[in-house]
């Protein structure tokens, strides 16, 4: 079985993070950052996601980012268990992914997807090893632009320069290319999360995914992000196969960061 689509609802939610100025690398790509989210369908918890960022020692502008995505094991209708790793470089103000690795776990076995971005040669290499250990995919995709992977796009949006326009972001989905529409409008508002007892200053954005991802995510999505230099994703609502779901920030490690008051 092939590894399922890699751009998940979690990374999709975390895209929405631009405001009216350029943020420092040290706040968006923050060495030692850890963000933990829970995913709910109505009042039912269906899973969680954890994101980590670490600077590569000895390389000023290289980072290793990781994500763990897992469904609630008490719910047999949902089966999600992924590990993602993305190696990212900041170069000339651009977010450049170099390698993306995804592991999917099922019944004690592991399937692996490796995506290597050969920027100098203008192609992307894709490899999939199935649960039985056999190579199922070994292919190349020619490219004429910089594509984001399912995890680097989280950091791409948080770091990127200010935009007040609709943008179509190229992404690699499984073994093919796709796009995500993001409506950047710098709409400032307040939002509540259960871990904080005051209204949080945030930026609200919307978008549309032209593919189907984990939990059946497809179509419209929206989210709230901290209105400060860290641009921490706080909350999001998304459409999936089973209906509307909500993601919410539950814990964080980002220096002394606390959600800004509205």
Image (cartoon, rainbow, N blue to C red):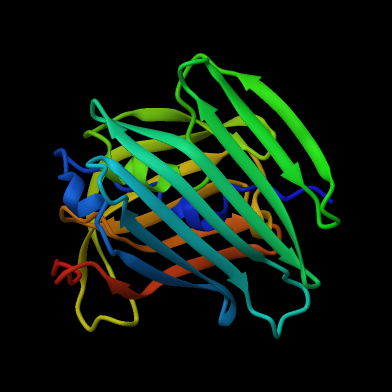
Q: Nearer the viewer, residue 53 or 259?
A: 53
Query: Residue at the spot x=72%, y=71% of the render?
Result: 78
Q: Nearer the viewer, residue 205 or 135?
A: 135
- Establish if 62 lies above or below 238: above
Q: Position of residue 258 (x, y in %)?
A: 18, 72
249 on left or right of 190: right
| Picture quadrant where residue 228 is located | bottom left
- Establish if 242 lies above or below 90: below
Q: Position of residue 22 (x, y in %)?
A: 16, 38
Q: Nearer the viewer, residue 91 or 42?
A: 91
| Picture quadrant where residue 156 is located | top left
Query: Residue at the spot x=59%, y=56% of the render?
Result: 239
What is the total number of numbered labels drawn onto the structure image?
A: 0
Query: Residue at the spot x=68%, y=55% of the render?
Result: 216
Q: Residue furthest front?
A: 58
89 on left or right of 177: left
62 on left or right of 153: left
Q: Position of residue 197 (x, y in %)?
A: 23, 84
Viewport quadrant of the C terminus:
bottom left
Q: Position of residue 207 (x, y in %)?
A: 46, 42
Query: Residue at the spot x=47%, y=21% of the render?
Result: 119
């Amino acid at each position: 079985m092939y590894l399922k689509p890699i751009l998940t609802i979690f990374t999709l939610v975390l895209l929405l993070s631009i405001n009216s100025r350029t943020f420092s690398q040290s706040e968006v790509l923050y060495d030692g950052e850890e963000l933990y989210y829970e995913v709910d369908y109505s009042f039912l918890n269906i899973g969680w996601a954890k994101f980590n960022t670490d600077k590569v020692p000895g390389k000023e502008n290289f980072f290793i980012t990781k994500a763990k995505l897992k469904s609630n094991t008490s719910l047999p209708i949902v089966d999600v268990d992924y590990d993602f790793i993305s190696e990212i470089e900041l170069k000339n103000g651009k977010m450049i992914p170099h390698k993306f690795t995804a592991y999917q776990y099922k019944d004690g076995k592991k399937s692996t997807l490796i995506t290597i971005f050969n920027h100098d040669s203008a192609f992307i290499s894709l490899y999939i090893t199935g649960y039985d250990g056999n190579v199922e995919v070994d292919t190349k995709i020619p490219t004429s632009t910089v594509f984001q992977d399912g995890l680097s796009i989280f950091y791409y949006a948080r770091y990127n320069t200010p935009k007040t326009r609709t943008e179509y972001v190229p992404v690699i989905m499984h073994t093919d290319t796709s796009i995500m529409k993001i409506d950047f409008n710098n709409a400032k508002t307040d939002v509540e999360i259960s871990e904080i007892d005051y209204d949080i200053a945030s930026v609200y954005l919307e978008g549309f995914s032209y593919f189907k991802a984990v939990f059946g995510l497809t179509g419209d999505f929206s989210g709230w992000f901290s209105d400060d230099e860290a641009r921490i994703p706080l909350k999001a609502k998304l459409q999936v196969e089973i209906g509307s779901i909500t993601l919410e920030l539950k814990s964080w490690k980002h220096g002394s960061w606390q959600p800004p008051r509205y």
